[in-house]
Structure formats: structure tokens, C-alpha cells
Image: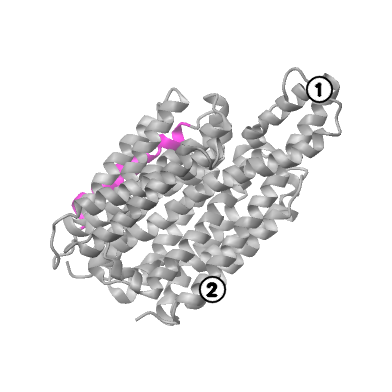
Amino acid sequence: MATVSLSSAKGKWVMVATILASAMAFIDATALNVVLPALQQNLNASGADLFWVLNSYLLMLASLILIGGAMGDKLGRKRVFMGGIVLFIVGSAACGIASSITMLIICRAVQGIGGAFMIPGSLSLISSAINPNERGKAIGTWSAFTTVVTMGGPVLGGALADAGLWRYIFFINVPIGIAAFIMLAFRVDETRDTGGNKTLDFPGAITIALALALLTFGFLRIPAVGFAHFQAYGSLAGGLLFLIIFIVIEKRSKHPMMPLTLFGNPVFTGVNLLTFFLYAGLGAGMLFMSLNLVQVQGYSQLQSGLTFLPFTVLMVTIARYAGSLADKYGPKWFLIIGPAIAGAGLFLLSLIGKTNGPSDYWTTFFPGVFVLGLGMSLTVAPLTAAVMSSVSDHFSGTASGVNNAMTRISGVFANAIFGALAVLFFTSTLTKQIEQVSLSPQQKEQVIKQAGDLGDAKVPANIPSAQKKVIAAYYNDSFVNAYAGIMRISAGLGFLGSLMAMAFIRKKPK
């Protein structure tokens, strides 16, 4: 279809529908981080179970998101987008009524399948429908509004969790999804790649799904079984093998699902590397900060959610203008400065030890959250605009799918690798500390066994009463030490993202 102005009626309907649908997926992620402690207690979940609640969704999303983007380009972006919304709504409702942690994990996987077909569609529709001269501004608007909803997720999640209503984090997706579906059905025109062949690359689709699923599963199993276990190294080796087969198939295919020539563009390659590093750091940082606030620092879940409000305010006030300026001057300097500032914010957050709770917020967590929010506000819209403008319009769904896959795979990397590192840091600190306490070897072993639950570690029942407070304090100290280590690594990933922009991105795109 012909492109339309952002200020036109059709342009506004495209923006509202895509923002609403995207908001479902994004609010789910941030709100879920905050309600994890309540969910853990209500469903009697272990620390490993919590990571699978996050990762079952990411596993399906990362495995299928490239297929979702390619299908939208070939079969119709609106059609595939709407199908994804339906699946996401069904998965969300099922999550809300889950009676066990196992059922919740399975239903989260259904959400992930829906997300794989829904998430690439939002940016693909914007890129193919909105006038190219206003694309950066449109993506900036989308980024600002979706981020407001995303960062409002912790506040909503905290309020619901404190009221014992954490299940409504999932139920709220149902009316939002229905509204987006109706708008898309009646107010938004279909777009697809009319110049290309509609044949789907089934061999490529199957091999990339297997490759990403095996790589993701391998990373997720490392914390539980160790790298030396066949489930870990076997899955990773199988994933790499299928990835090589996928590359061979795409090179030989007449109608490839993911044209490898896209990676011949240094901007496309550089922006995706930046995305991987920055979002791995951001995902790990926000997850462990949420756990730290509630489980160690004494914040309620609502107070934990409110700590992210400065981030939201900055995104509202800056992101849209950053997108417009990137249209005018090019994204390069935004993508160098923004991730570096975000990295500095994560580093500031790593310096925080045990505090006196919410009364210390303004002098402890606020400076780091503010700097992190400023960095991400300068980055998000120029980053997305750089991805979408680095390819021709008929590859917009594929480009969005690749970039979103990088974001989700980085989330898996963060949850799996950083989860294992956190347990390692926690155990190392705890092992040194309990040497100072007169306990039997069996009691010490039971104390250390709790390390897998991180901030939710409970003092074993057979520990003498006089020493229970000491052990509880050691658990808090060990978690704070693990948190600091994870945040510093996250900061390093932000700085690495900045280096990717410096190395690969030109001052102004072609």
C-alpha cells in the first residue's frame, strides 16, 4: 500500500493498534519481574522454577520470531500480527488460571509462540505504512508510548502483587489484545511484499527454529546441570550444527527466509550486535535489581515498581525527540552516547550495598535509575530506526524479526548465564562467611544448599536459634555481593554496545 502521513487518520490508527499490541508483550516482561516473589510463594516455586517462568516464554519466542517476521512479509503483516495477538491472548488467560508452577511454565510457552508472530509485526507495519521521512519520529513515538506502558508495568505489578492479585498481570492482556485486534481488523490496511515470491522457506524455517531452540535450551540448562552435562553441551553443539545448516540453506535458496546479504550491511550487523549486548545487560540489571529491592532491601512490591518511574518519565520526554533528531542527523552519536550512559547507570547501581529501605531511595537507587533511563531514552528510538532504515521496505518484517530475536536471545543469555553466575557469586561469599560460625559440616552443607534460591534463601530449621539471625544476615550479604557482580558485568555490556556503534554505524544512513 502507499505510505501515509503520521498525522493522518490511517497513520494514527496504525500507531494506536501497534502500540496497544506491543504493550501486551512489554508490560508482561517488566511486571512479571516485580511479581516473581509473590508468585514464588503462592505456587511454592524454587529459584530455578522462577527462571523457567521467564525462559519458557523466551525459548519459544527466540525460536520462532524469525519465522514470524518472514511470514508477515510474505503472507501479510496485518494477518500474521492478528494471529499472534489471538495466541497471546489465549496464552495470557491460561497463565492467569494456572494452578501449578508447571502449568504456568507451559502456558508461558504458548504466550511465547503468540509473541513470535506478534512482536515483529508492530515495527514492520509502521515501517511499511508510514512515510519514510517520518519513520524515525513514528518509531520514536512507538518507543516512547510502549516504554511508558512497559515501565508502568512494575508499578501495576507491584500494586497487584501486594494485594495478592498477581494473576491479573496476565488477565489484563485480554481486553488490551481484543481492542488492538478490532482496530487492526477494521482500521488498518494490509501490507505485504508484493514484489517477491510468496513461497515460504520451510527448510530454512525448520532449521533456524531448531537451532535457536537448542541453543536457548542449552544455555538454560547450564545453571542446573553444568556445562559438562550432555543436556548442556549436546544442546549447544546441536544448535550450532543446525545454525550452520541454516546458513547453507539460505545461501542456496531462491527465496530465503533471511537473506544473508542483509548482514553485508555494516549498519544492520552493528545495530544487531549493539542490541544483543545492551539488552543482555539491561535485562539482567532490571531482573536482579527487582529481586534485590524486595527480597533484601525491604521494599514492598509496589515500592519496587515505583523505583522505575524516573526511567518512564525520561522515556516520555526524550525518546520521541531522539527519534526525530536521528532522522535529521543520523543515529550514530545517539547509539554511541546512549549505551555508554546506560552502562554508567548500571555501574552506579552496582555500588549500592545494604540500605535502610525506601527511605534511602533518593540517595541510593535513584541516581543509577535516572542515568540508566537517560541512556536508554537516547538509544531506543534511534536504534530501532537504524535497523528499519538499513534495509529496503520489503524486508521490514525480516529485519524487525532479526532485531527482536537479538533482544530475546540476549534475554535468554542474561537469565541463563547471569543466573548461574549469581548462584556462583552467592555461594562463594556465603562459603567464606559461614566459616566464622560454629556449625557441623552437615549444617553448613544445608545452609549452602539454599544458595540456589538467591534472595529467597531460607535458614534451615535445624540451625540453632542463636545463629539463625547471623545466617539470615549472611544470606542478605551474599545476595548483595552477587547483585553487585551481575550489575558490573551488565554495565560492561552497555559499554560494549557503545563500541559496536562506534565501529559499525555511519554518521548518516544511506
* Snapshot quadrant of residue 2: bottom left
For disc 2, the marked residue is: 336
Instruction: In this rendered view, identify the residue nearer to me: 255 or 388.
Output: 255
- On screen, residue 289 versus residue 1, left or right, reads right
Q: Residue at x 28, y 45 (%)?
A: 84
Q: Residue at x 62, y 33 (%)?
A: 453
Image coordinates of residue 168 in percent, x first then y, are 45, 33
Instruction: In this rendered view, identify the residue nearer to me: 407 or 170.
Output: 407
* Snapshot quadrant of residue 478: top right
Q: Earlier in the sequence, mark 2 or mark 1?
A: 2
Image coordinates of residue 384 in percent, x first then y, are 40, 65
- On screen, residue 295 versus residue 502, left or right, reads right
Image coordinates of residue 357 in percent, x first then y, are 74, 42
- Residue 440 - label: 1
Q: Disc 1 residue type?
A: Ser
Is residue 61 depicted above or below 106 in this figure? below
Highlighted range, magenta: 167-188
**Number of marks:** 2
